[in-house]
Image (spheres, helix red, strand yellow):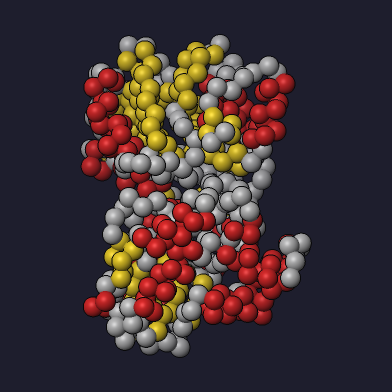
């Protein structure tokens, strides 16, 4: 995942871009960058975040950006960005929230036209540079962005900083959000609207799927109207989104309360002493569960430090195990001889959850009931770099299904049986997971309950990870 922030103002906006980008730190752990335009001159800085925070990396550099009144910032789990480029349509900087499924095909197409690539991301083609080059193939920024939407498979939301404006373009199916805010001095656009409040900007609206706008300090001009088909990522509410964020008019924390309440209503057969959330994203779900169930909410786990990266991100299994082991500490005051129902956002590879359960059992918990706020992840994400890895069978649910079926060659209709919460295959899969993780009980959120908790029509949500349902073209 990635998150970006852009600002155009009648006064200096360097600090606003700095803090606005920092408010997206939960969306990326690997690379970050900012680019500004001052008197027609582009200035850019990019840093690794793998050994520090965004603020620590960029704060000392702020004076070099001068009194710039237009800029963008981005935090990413993947490629270094923003990318600056000079083309026949001018100079511009590009920041993306993207996953391009056909990046190899598009790369070869450009190489065949004698283009070259200067940026690399872990020895791979930088997706933001590819987008920047594609934009330069057209006769205008608008046509270039539309060419990107036409060419890529996957998803791509874009900010383009020029010497006269910022262009903001939401993915053609709206899988990732872009919100617009304003104050008396100018306008901002961001992946998360919660970045506006403390900077003094008021929310204006969300961009629609495929919509392109041009932002100047004087206003917002629609360059391309939104499309009619939308599939915003459901995981924004379940996991990625900050609790204070709003997407499509729906608050993240409020949605998580409803998710937890839905699971509580289906839990008729357990009598826990209290509910708890696996921090941080499980907390809202657990509060909703506790309120609906009429039981206390307590914290038998506390996060030691936010510096540990999300445990599903490191590709190295040894590092994933270390991250899972170190990031949470049990509190024995609330564990000894207790019957606890836990809410977690998801089970991706199972690494963190397995280690946490061992900690709880060692701390004397009598019963560990685990409730997962979304259905089992069966299909690797093709759109946001979530639940993706070098091997499809890194996904915990996939590994269990493979072991149950005894083969790697499983047709989709069989996977669909496992995705159906009322099927015998699904129930046996969950039972196997429960035994393997040493849980007293395990249940996953039903997809229909999740859709209802979010509050949008099913066709407006991307649920590919759970049921292989998505728009491709």
In the image: residue 322, left or right of residue 473: left
The image shows residue 59, relative to residue 438, as above or below, that is: above
* Quarter of the figure with residue 433: bottom right
In the image, is residue 340 above or below residue 229?
Answer: below
Residue drawn at x 40%, y 69% is 356
Using the rendered image of the protein, determine whether residue 409 is visible from the camera's viewpoint. yes
The residue at the point 49 percent across, 40 percent down is 78
Q: Is residue 67 left or right of residue 208?
A: left
Q: Position of residue 164 (x, y in %)?
A: 40, 16
Write the residue at 57% across / 80% down. 431
Residue beneath the point at 35% across and 41% down: 51
Picture coordinates of residue 63 (x, y %)?
Answer: 23, 22
Q: Report which quarter residue 161 is drawn in.
A: top left
Q: Position of residue 111 (x, y in %)?
A: 68, 22
Residue 464 relative to residue 239: left or right: right
Looking at the image, is 302 positioned above or below residue 27?
below
Give how far across and how far down residue 364 sits, in percent. 33, 82
Can residue 225 be seen from the camera position used here?
A: no
142 or 108: which is nearer to us?
108
């Amino acid at each position: 995942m990635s998150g970006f922030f852009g600002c155009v103002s009648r006064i200096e906006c360097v600090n606003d871009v700095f803090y606005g980008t920092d408010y997206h730190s939960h969306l990326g752990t690997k690379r970050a960058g900012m680019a500004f335009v001052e008197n027609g001159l582009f200035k850019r800085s990019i840093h690794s975040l793998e050994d520090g925070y965004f603020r620590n990396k960029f704060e000392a550099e702020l004076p070099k950006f001068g009194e710039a009144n237009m800029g963008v910032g981005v935090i990413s789990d993947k490629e270094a960005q923003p990318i600056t480029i000079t083309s026949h349509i001018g100079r511009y900087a590009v920041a993306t929230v993207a996953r391009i499924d056909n990046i190899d095909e598009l790369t070869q197409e450009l190489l065949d036209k004698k283009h070259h690539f200067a940026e690399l991301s872990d020895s791979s083609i930088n997706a933001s540079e590819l987008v920047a080059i594609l934009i330069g193939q057209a006769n205008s920024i608008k046509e270039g962005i539309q060419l990107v939407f036409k060419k890529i498979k996957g998803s791509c939301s874009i900010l383009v900083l020029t010497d006269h404006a910022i262009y903001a373009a939401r993915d053609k199916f709206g899988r990732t959000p872009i919100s617009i805010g304003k104050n008396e001095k100018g306008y901002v656009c961001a992946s998360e609207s919660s970045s506006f409040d403390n900077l003094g900007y008021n929310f204006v609206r969300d961009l629609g799927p495929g919509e392109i706008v041009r932002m100047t300090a004087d206003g917002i001009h629609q360059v391309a109207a939104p499309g009619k088909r939308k599939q915003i990522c459901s995981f924004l509410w379940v996991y990625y989104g900050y609790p204070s964020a709003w997407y499509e008019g729906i608050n993240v924390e409020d949605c998580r309360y409803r998710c937890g309440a839905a699971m509580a209503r289906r839990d008729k057969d357990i009598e826990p002493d209290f509910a708890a959330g696996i921090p941080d994203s499980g907390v809202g779900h657990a509060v909703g569960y506790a309120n609906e169930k009429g039981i206390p909410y307590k914290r038998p786990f506390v996060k030691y430090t936010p510096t540990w990266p999300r445990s599903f991100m490191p590709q190295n299994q040894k590092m994933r195990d270390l991250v899972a082991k170190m990031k949470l500490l049990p509190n024995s005051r609330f564990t000894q001889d207790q019957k606890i129902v836990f809410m977690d956002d998801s089970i991706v590879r199972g690494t963190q959850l397995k280690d946490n359960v061992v900690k709880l059992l060692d701390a004397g918990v009598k019963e560990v009931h685990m409730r997962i706020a979304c259905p089992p992840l069966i299909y690797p994400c093709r759109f946001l770099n979530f639940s993706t890895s070098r091997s499809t069978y890194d996904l915990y649910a996939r590994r269990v299904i493979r072991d149950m079926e005894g083969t790697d060659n499983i047709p989709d209709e069989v996977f669909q049986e496992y995705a159906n919460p009322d099927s015998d295959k699904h129930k046996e899969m969950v039972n196997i997971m429960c035994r393997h993780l040493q849980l007293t009980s395990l249940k996953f959120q039903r997809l229909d309950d999740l859709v209802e908790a979010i509050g949008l029509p099913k066709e407006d949500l991307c649920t590919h990870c759970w049921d292989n349902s998505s728009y491709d073209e």
